[in-house]
Image (spheres, helix red, strand yellow):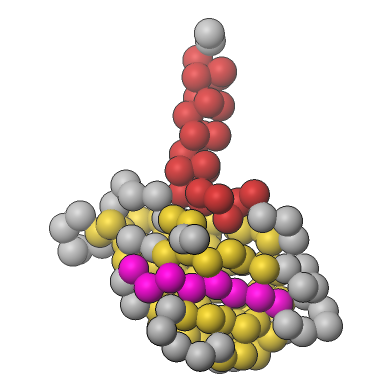
Amino acid sequence: MNILSIASAAVTFSLVAIHGASAQQPGIKRTDLVKNDIVVSGKEAIQVRVDFDPGAFAVNHRHPGEEIAYVLEGALEYKLEGRGAIILTAGQSLFIPYGVAHSARNVGSGNASELATYIVTKGSPLVEPVQ
């Protein structure tokens, strides 16, 4: 195995570890923007753009830290464990506490996008599917 093959395998493994099951969901595209250590020991900041095709659904999942979701375009319905559903449109945001299971669905007639900012435990999978 040459160095290029090893590097390619390492990148592929890293992307799978970061995105978990959500990377495979049809109609959803995640684009990594920032990943950086922060001053809090053992934590890192990650920022991702998430694009949803019409009707696309991000299944129930949680993160190893907090998330702030900011809707860039369209209308997204969020369901957080223990709370009622909420629909956010472009320019609105939502704080999702550490470990709270949640889902998101594009409920608009066109595409929808969010900017997801996470403060999470460094080295942990970013997404953990929840039944």
Count of labels shown? Answer: 0
Q: Is residue 4 above or below residue 82?
A: above
Outermost residue toward the right in this view:
109
The residue nearer to you, when weighing 7 against 98, is 98
* Occupied quadrant, residue 91: bottom right
The majority secondary structure of the magenta stretch comes to: strand
Q: In this view, does 84 lie to the left or right of 66?
A: right
The residue nearer to you, when weighing 3 against 74, is 74
What residue is drawn where x is 64% and y is 49%?
A: 24
Outermost residue toward the front in this view:
131
Q: In this view, does 74 lie to the left or right of 47?
A: right
Q: Is residue 130 above or below residue 100?
A: above
* Occupied quadrant, residue 77: bottom right
What residue is drawn where x is 31% and y is 71%?
A: 98
Outermost residue toward the left in this view:
41
Q: Does the magenta stretch include residue 34?
A: no
* Occupied quadrant, residue 74: bottom right
Q: Is residue 101 magenta?
A: yes
The residue nearer to you, when weighing 77 against 3, is 77
What residue is drawn where x is 49% and y is 34%?
A: 13
Q: Is residue 15 above or below residue 68?
A: above
Q: Which residues are the magenta region?
A: 99-106
Residue 88 position in % (x across, y down): 60, 90
Q: In this view, does 3 lie to the left or right of 114?
A: left
Q: Is residue 16 visible?
A: yes
Residue 29 position in % (x across, y down): 67, 58
Residue 106 position in % (x across, y down): 70, 77
